[in-house]
Amino acid sequence: QVQLVESGGGLVQAGGSLRLSCAASGRTFSSYAMGWFRQAPGKEREFVGGISWSGDLTQYADSVKGRFTISRDNAENTLYLQMNSLKPEDTAVYYCAVRGGVMIRMRYEEYDYWGQGTQVTVSS
């Protein structure tokens, strides 16, 4: 049984920082690309950032580029998202996901396993 569990969400003021974690279990994910997505109320799920299986390639949405950093620890089967300079428009439920391939993809349909999500709320 594959399981992804996000943590680290919460309420923060604009300009603040949060670090999200995603603990994976049930299989070894070191050979697969992983990603972070978010979904705000009334909006579609959108790509935030992705990382290749080795961690040497990353890709970000334009809206978070320069503020968010994605990383992974394959030995610990854990994915991270460091979020700095947070804005109210970053408010959403954040999801981690794993896809059955080594390369990053931006479409959520190309990811196979999902966590339950963690709420991030940025106040102005």
Image: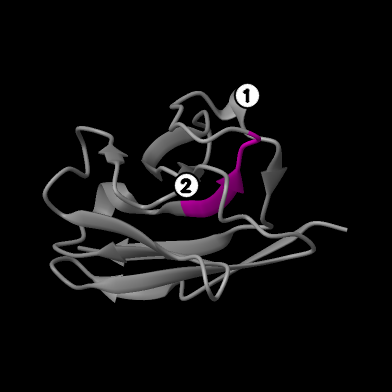
**Residue type indicated by callout 2:** Trp
Callout 2 secondary element: loop
- Which residue is more in the foreground, 92 or 1? 1
Callout 1 secondary element: helix
Mark in front: 1 vs 2: 2
Q: Is residue 7 above or below residue 65?
A: below
Task: Tell me which corner region of the image, top left, top right, bottom left or bottom right, holds residue 72.
Answer: bottom left
Q: Is residue 12 above or below residue 35?
A: below
Q: Please state the extent of the stretch shown in magenta in the rendering.
A: 93-100
Identified at 56% across, 29% down, the residue is 108
Label drawn at residue 109 = 1
Identified at 22% across, 44% down, the residue is 64
Left or right? Give the position of 18 relative to 85.
Answer: right
**Residue type indicated by callout 1:** Glu
Name the residue at the right extreme. Answer: 1
Residue that mark 2 sits on: 53
Identified at 58% across, 32% down, the residue is 101
